[in-house]
Image (cartoon, grey):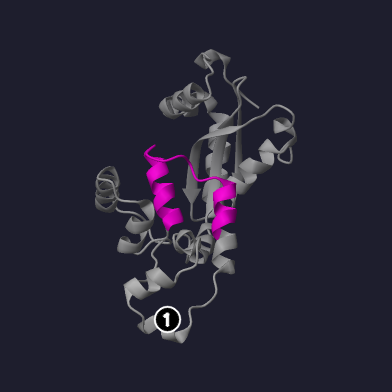
Amino acid sequence: MTHRSHEAWTPTEERDLIARFKGGEYPGDLAKSIGRTELAVRARLAKFHLLPSVTAEDIEKYRTIRHSVAEPELETKSASPSELQSSKPEGEEEKDRFVATFDVQQAFHRFHFVYAIVNPSGSIYVGYTQDVWHRISQHNRDLGAIQTRNCGPWFPFAIYCFAAEIDARSMELQIHRSFHDFALRVEKSLREVLAQIGVAIRSDQLALI
């Protein structure tokens, strides 16, 4: 089945995905049945707080496994599912869950992201990137913007995706100009993240850096 990770999710698809996941279906099985990669499915479920957010380490793991999986031999194509299952070496089944993720990587880097991260002291940084999880990991390794160095760890609480860089840059500028309005819009998400890391901060203690 052709992978559709570059296509936008419709509300109907999202509702069906959530219902099936809550019904006990594994993300890998869901991905195969709907023609998307598991990375895309996990990211969509994370949006609704049903799974942890996809991290830079997850993306790197998918990329590594994708490149390490050899092309199947011709005779394997005619083998039955039971024969394939019995002939798989140990650990191969785990790899299957991450096969065909290169497509989503290609699509992922065609988009532009504006992200907001917060640290335990209530400092908020808003930035632009084309590789959002890698960029956030850089902030946490003190390789990001100067403002974010030596004051982590940093936790994402809002991420916006755009097809055009000009739209992303415009959004970033708008947030910086109207930080109070932005904080009100994302207050629920921000409070959830702060609660998860055990930090109680009033809204007037938050500061955009």
Q: What range of the chain is rendered magenta?
A: 38-62
Residue 123 position by quadrant: top right
Magenta segment includes 5: no
Vertically, is 121 above or below 193? above
Q: Is residue 100 shown left or right of residue 131?
A: left
Q: Going by the image, does 79 lie left or right of 172?
A: left
Quadrant in the rendering for residue 170:
top right
Give the position of the N terminus as an image quadrant: bottom left
Residue shown at the point (57%, 32%) measured from the top left = 155
Q: Specify whether residue 109 is in view.
A: no
Left of 53 or right of it: where is 16?
Answer: left
Is residue 94 visible in the rendered image? The answer is yes
Horizontal arrangement in the rendering, residue 20 relative to residue 209 (left or right): left
Please state the horizontal and vertical placement of residue 31, each as a whole percent of the image. Answer: 36, 59
Q: Position of residue 30 (x, y in %)?
A: 33, 56
Nearer to me, 11 or 16: 16
Height in image: 189 above or below 89? above
Q: Which residue is mark 1?
A: 76
Q: Secondary structure at mark 1?
A: helix
Q: Report the residue at 57% width, 14% height from top.
A: 205
Q: Magenta span has 40? A: yes
